[in-house]
Amino acid sequence: MKSWPSNSWLRHPLSAPVLLVAVILAVYYPAMSSGILPIDDPGIFDLFSASPHLSTVLLPGNGYYYRPLVELSFYLDNVLWGMEPSTMHLENILLHCANSLVVYLLARRISCDDETPVIPLLAALLFALHPVNVEAVAWIAGRTDPLITLFVLSATYFLLRWIDQPQWQDMTVALFLFGAALLTKETALAFGAVVLLLILTWPGEATKRQRFNAVAIMAVPGVLLVIFVLIFRSGTSGLNRFLSGTDLPVTHGLWQALIALGFYARKLIVPFPLNFAINEVNPRNGLVCLALFPVLWWLFRRSRLSGILFTSAVLLILPAILVAVKQVAWTPFAERYLYLSTAFIALGVVGLCGIWQQKYPVVLQTFFVLLLCGFALSSFQRNLLLDDHLAFFQDAVAKSPEFGSAYYSLGGELIQKGKIDQAAMAFATAERLNQRDSMRYPIKSSIMGTLLAKGSYLEARTYFFQLFKKKQDAPVDFLEILYVADGKRLESVKKEGKPQLADDLLETLGLLYLKKPDPFWLYRSGQIALVAGKSVEAADFFRRAYAAAPMDAHYKAAAKTYFLRLEDGKL
């Protein structure tokens, strides 16, 4: 077998990067047509399509988390191409390409071999094709992880340059990039531990004094962020929950943390089965975690650089462990949380491959060919699955049959496909399994919506009043469904019953306008008032609707016609 290092085409400086990008584009191109995933993506599109003021993006207290740089990217998506989903998917893929290229550059620096870039290329391909990364890349809302990874990996590159040959320019760039990572996702604080590890243990020309000074300098962005978060803590609910205490006993919480760490460590090595909705994991993963520490010690003994990099990967998992213990996210466990860690795992492989390449070159090459082909096929299939949202959530509930929120998402996809009875069953299962108070009303609203979709208008109204004693107690979503149900009933009710039902509808519309001041509700109130025989009230509703409606509102001209004719006594 011809040895890979002897292939001269790989020695061209652009060969490996071009091959790397080409492979990523080939594997991830199906993601460009996967549209908007019904989890988190709709909220992003609703918020930024409304062209919010830039201050709401950059200043704290306006969102669930304070992540101004990733939100700025969505803001620019709206300004530049109107939130076009395929373009936004392409952005994520290009971010993944950029991260893979930085992994390649880091791997070349670690391997210290400019003549044979095969091992760095293999490391970059391992990161690029790792199946657990598909979720972060193919999901628009997952952009946070590729973006923070770009800053963290770039900061690592300049930090290693500084350790190797201290120059203030490299430290300045590393400091700036660390700050950018913190403004992308608060979990970048875990990178502070990696920075400390690298500065104190990575071999290079930096003296002890320089290293200790560097620790103090690199701590500045993290300290500033902590102070900033504490000042604005009450305005950022996600961080407030993340930082809040927990009712778990210490021993139980520690065991849950070990289980989570063991699960993620295993996922990095054996990523299957892939699952978007993971609500619980096997407790035996705690034993995997206990085996992790002697393995890391052995790696340190075998290859110091690999041991440092693998330990860095573990340190970067710590925020995901906190999420699992505190249950602060939609899914307590998520594959996307491993995106950054897979980069350091791939870099850690470089040191080991340098040893094994000398002893077992054929075995190593064969192993990597098979592994990367398997990862590429799996990632490609996962991208194809994401393109079919119904099949995607069917896969999720098959792998997490006790996860209520997954059934809720499945029901929404079934509704869109017109499979109302199946959707009703999915929502009923979601209600039975739901353990999250925040999902209680969305699930019940969807159940009421299925009754509406089936034409069971009276049943929808009955269900509404089983939930709420008074209309005033109901959220807007429920009032909208009640309005539609009663509006359909108004079309078929006998003439003598119309005034009473019309008065009921006017009450519903009044509450809707009070809770959600949309001039359209005034316009509809005018139409219903006409049915109730209240011409004077109808004219007032139409006049107010015309005055408040936007210039491009489809009902504005009709509202003007209505109130003018009513004032002239022609209606």
Image: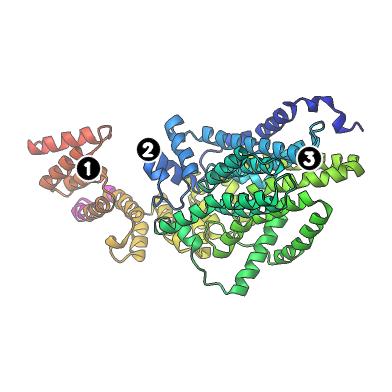
What is the C-alpha distance between the residues marked 1 and 2?
26 Å
Q: Amino acid at mark 3?
A: Ser
Q: Position of residue 491 (x, y in %)?
A: 27, 47
- Figure quadrant of residue 91: top right
Left or right of residue 121: residue 59: left
| Quadrant into which the N terminus falls | top right
Q: Residue at x 27, y 45 (%)?
A: 518
Quadrant in which the C terminus appears: top left
Over which residues does the magenta segment extend? Answer: 491-503
Q: CA distance from mark 3 to mark 2?
A: 47 Å
**305 left or right of 415?**
right
Residue at figure coordinates x 20%, y 50% from the top left = 495
Q: Which residue is mark 1?
A: 523
Q: Amino acid at mark 2?
A: Ser
Q: Residues within 10 Å of mark 2 (few under 14, many from 20)?
A: few
Q: Quick check: is 502 in the magenta stretch?
A: yes
Q: Amino acid at mark 1?
A: Tyr
Which one is earlier in the sequence, the residue at label 1 or at label 3? 3
99 shown above or below 498:
above
Helix, strand or loop for disc 1: helix
Which label number is shown at residue 111? 3
Q: Is residue 386 visible?
A: no
Relative to the observer, which residue lies in front, 83 or 563? 83
Note whether 277 is above or below 181 in the view shown. Answer: below
- Which mark's residue is nearer the viewer, 3 or 2? 3
| Residue 12's disc number | none
Residue 33, position in %: x, y?
A: 56, 35
Characterize the magenta stretch by its predominant secondary structure. helix
Q: Which residue is mark 2?
A: 51
Q: Where is residue 359 drawn, in percent x and y?
A: 92, 44
Which of disc 2 and disc 1 is earlier in sequence? 2
Image location (x, y in percent) of residue 563: 14, 38
